[in-house]
Amino acid sequence: MTTAASFQIEYLQFLDPQGKVVNSLPEFATDAAKLVELYRAMVLMRTYDAKAIALQRTGQLGTYASMLGKEAVEAGIGAAMAKDDVFLCTYRENGVQIMRGVTIQELLLYWGGDERGSDFAVPRKDFPVCITIASQCLHAAGVAYAMKLRKQKRAAVCMIGDGATSKGDFYEGLNAAGTWQLPLVFFITNNQWAISVPRTTQSAAQTLAQKAIAAGVAGVQIDGNDVIAVHHAVTEALAKAHAGGGPTVIEAVTYRLADHTTADDASRYRPPEQVADAWKREPILRLRNYLSEAAAWDKAREETLLKQCNEQVQAAAQAYIDTPPPPLEQMFDHLYATLPAAYFAQRAAIIGK
Amino acid sequence: MAQITLVEAINLALHRAMADDGDVVVLGQDVGRDGGVFRATLGLLDKFGPERVIDTPLAENLIAGASIGMAAEGLKPVAEIQFSGFSYTVLDQILNHAGRLRHRTRGRLSCPMVLRTPCGAGIHPPEHHSESPDAMFAHIPGIRVVYPSSPKRAYGLLLAAIRDPDPVIFLEPTRLYRLFKEEVADDGQSLALDACYTLREGTDVTLVSWGAMIYETLQVADELSEQGIAAEVIDVATLKPIDFDTILASVAKTGRCVIVTEAPRHCSIASEISAHLAEHGLLTLLAPVLRVTAPDVVVPLSRLEHHYLPGKAQITAAVRKVLEFA
């Protein structure tokens, strides 16, 4: 017998859980100021996340999906993407969205049950949150196809979770990205849990990154709690995409420190020791350790930052709370470009006119 | 002006739309080199190239989902699902995304796509090639559903569908693809997307149908006229939204209505039209509205297919019944 094909999946990590450098840093990371920017973004995300949960717990927000523990993933992607790239995401990617210019008020409006929250003032071409698992992988293929057809130097970034890689939609989008050599980055956040189903039940594949190989696409696994690794991997993948080099799959290994959503109770299905252990590898602490060690961060700066984040989030939350519900006619007014006459009577009946 | 078949009219409209607008792309299985399994996309690849005439991997969900992404970026994708039985796979994309992208982003993104699929029974194909998913699609908010029944209307309605800023499901009556020819001018003129077409005027009974059943319905109207019965025949043509006003006005004139469809009866578009007549036209009716439909069964394989499809005898019997109603 001979070998018909063989492959290997590389693993990328720069900072270990203690914040020690384990690989020579990419150039951007040698500039502490750049890492401080990422750190600030991550702390803002965690502040927002805590506020969103508090609003939900006090009856002021609908069901919310926390991103606790994946701030490195969010910040790394958000910082690596160019303005006119297109972002397609799940419901756990508010961090990237904030970095791309979506406002916290808009995000809270969406979770608070108001479609206007998806009418981002910027970025206008990004997709709204996708709830139906993996279905955005197909939109991403179409978006990237349009970019390639028009010979634009843009790319699409499509985020999914570990559970989504079990779906045909992921494979169909990935396969098309490979055969059409699309400017597209699939970013898999492997947080070990799809609600209550662990990664081990999702797939017998040793890594999720290797699913790329079946489609003839490059795949890499990275430490998803290491913002330098995330930023580096996404930057490289986007540079390749922008240069016409085709798609990439990145699997970021991390851990969902929160419940699936505020409607979930993860203690029903996972041991507390596992969560406690995962906290030792969380992304914000390790970057703070690194920055403190490099004398780029200290307690005073931390306190100032926390205060700023709290004020920013509080103001956005208040703006959300003060936003009156959308007018009733909006149910009809964005259904079609021009509402067909057949629906005039229904519209009039709803708005009471 | 050339005499052409319905499938040739679709091909003509696609050539026209692609020549007129560089944003129009055609995608689907075998739509390129093969020109489509029914040849609806014949010649497009040679004229417009593989970047705009895309032979996709064999994945229906991709065809629909990628179209949504393309449309959000400003292209005007015209996707082909090879047979209607394969279109159920794409319901998720059409329902959860195409029909709601404009709405859920308050108009920030939109989805100007067309999803074409051959539809209906009667050509003795293998299993899953004879379905009538018209009502299933028509139940979805935020989209349009169109179903032409002649070469002229196929040409004009397809151009309208491609130019429309919202998603359109374009159902094509496979049985009529090559059944007859008609003169079609390649004048780039589109037809209205929310209008019924009155194919024949009459005062005694209104026959309402769409898709391939228009063919038999018109034949029955001819036969009735020889017996001195003047039937008005309406091709609904656009199944969502439906131009109920034209149907109501006709029934106000005739007082009697038979609705003909080859789809199964339960929750069919015939049921919707019948309900609408009951709500808004009851006092003009001289007899109960009757539906002539397929039975609520799985489409049989070819040996029994013609017993499944409603025929002229059933349409005629229903007309007799509404005419004889005291």
Image: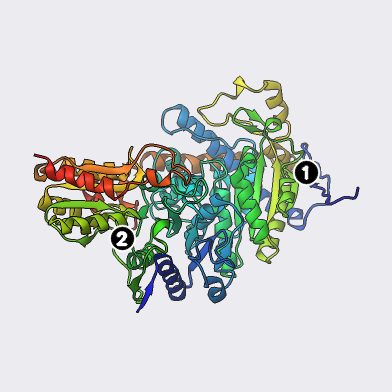
Question: Which of labels 1 and 2 is toward the front?
Answer: 2
Q: Is residue A18 above or below residue B263?
A: above
Q: Is residue A81 above or below residue A19?
A: below
Given contact means CB atoms under 8 Å apart, are the residues at marks 1 and 2 in contact? no
Q: Is residue B63 above or below residue A95?
A: below
Q: For residue B9, which quarter of the picture?
A: bottom left
Q: Nearer the viewer, residue A164 or A71?
A: A164
Q: Nearer the viewer, residue A347 or B323?
A: B323
> Within 10 angstroms of label 1, few (less than 14), some, or many (20 or more) residues?
many
Question: Which amino acid, by three-letter code, is at mark 1?
Answer: Leu
Residue A66 rendering spot, x and y as whole percentages: 56, 35
Residue drawn where x is 54% and y is 74% of the image: B48
- Using the image as rendered, state which of residue B289 and residue A276 is in the foreground: B289
Q: Which residue is mark 2?
A: B193
Secondary structure under tag 2 reads loop
Front residue (pair A105, A135): A135
Q: Separation of disc 1 and disc 2 at Cα?
A: 59 Å
Whether residue B237 is visible here, answered yes or no, is no
Judge whether residue B6 can be spotted in this image: yes
Q: Which residue is found at the position 53% from the left and 76% from the top? A: B47
Report which residue position mark 1 lands on. Answer: A15
Disc 1 is placed on an element classified as loop
Q: Position of residue A122 (x, y in %)?
A: 48, 56
Q: Circle 2 marks a residue in which chain?
A: B
Q: Are marks 1 and 2 on the same chain?
A: no
